[in-house]
Image (cartoon, rainbow, N blue to C red):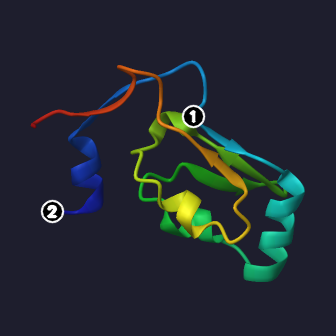
Amino acid sequence: MKIEEKLYTLRYKRDEIPHLEIKDQMTCKKCEETYGTPQPCISVCPANVYSWINGKIVVSYENCVECGACKIACPFNNIIWKYPRYGLGIALRYG
């Protein structure tokens, strides 16, 4: 099963409060200079939550599958990662 097919089995209940946050955009710029594009957080995210647009990381937290890989991959510990509030976030459709 491809990753896109697996992601289709997820259901989202969007939280109005983002559970992902970038601490400092300048640190992301430093990461881009050091590691190039795509940055580690963009490379490891299976749900394409992060994108690099006009010199800034844009976070589409609504699509997050809550795996936590981005926080681990960030070499500068620049991502604030929390679980969504109770009852919100992802749910498995078939399980």
* Residue 55 pos. (x, y %): 84, 58
Up the image or down, 33 lies above or below 16; here it is below
Say whether disc 2 or disc 1 marks the residue closer to the N-terminus. Answer: 2
What crowding class fits label 1: few (fewer than 14 Cα within 10 Å), some (14-19), or many (20 or more)?
some
* Residue 48 pos. (x, y %): 50, 53
The quadrant in which the N terminus is found is bottom left
Tell me: 4 left or right of 63.
Answer: left
Residue 49: mark in rendering: none
Spatial CA distance of label 2 from label 1 is 28 Å
Residue 1: mark in rendering: 2
* Residue 40 pos. (x, y %): 61, 71
Q: Amino acid at mark 2?
A: Met
| Labels 2 and 1 touching (C-beta < 8 A) | no
Q: Secondary structure at mark 2?
A: loop
Kindly indicate the quadrant of the structure image that contains residue 3.
bottom left
Which residue is at 86% across, 70% downward? 30
Residue indicated by mark 1: 19
Which residue is at 73% across, 57% downward? 78
Kindly indicate the quadrant of the structure image that contains residue 19.
top right
- Say which of 86 and 60 sits in front: 86
Which residue is at 68% across, 72% downward? 75
What crowding class fits label 2: few (fewer than 14 Cα within 10 Å), some (14-19), or many (20 or more)?
few
Tell me: 49 left or right of 47.
Answer: right
Foreground label between 2 and 1:
1
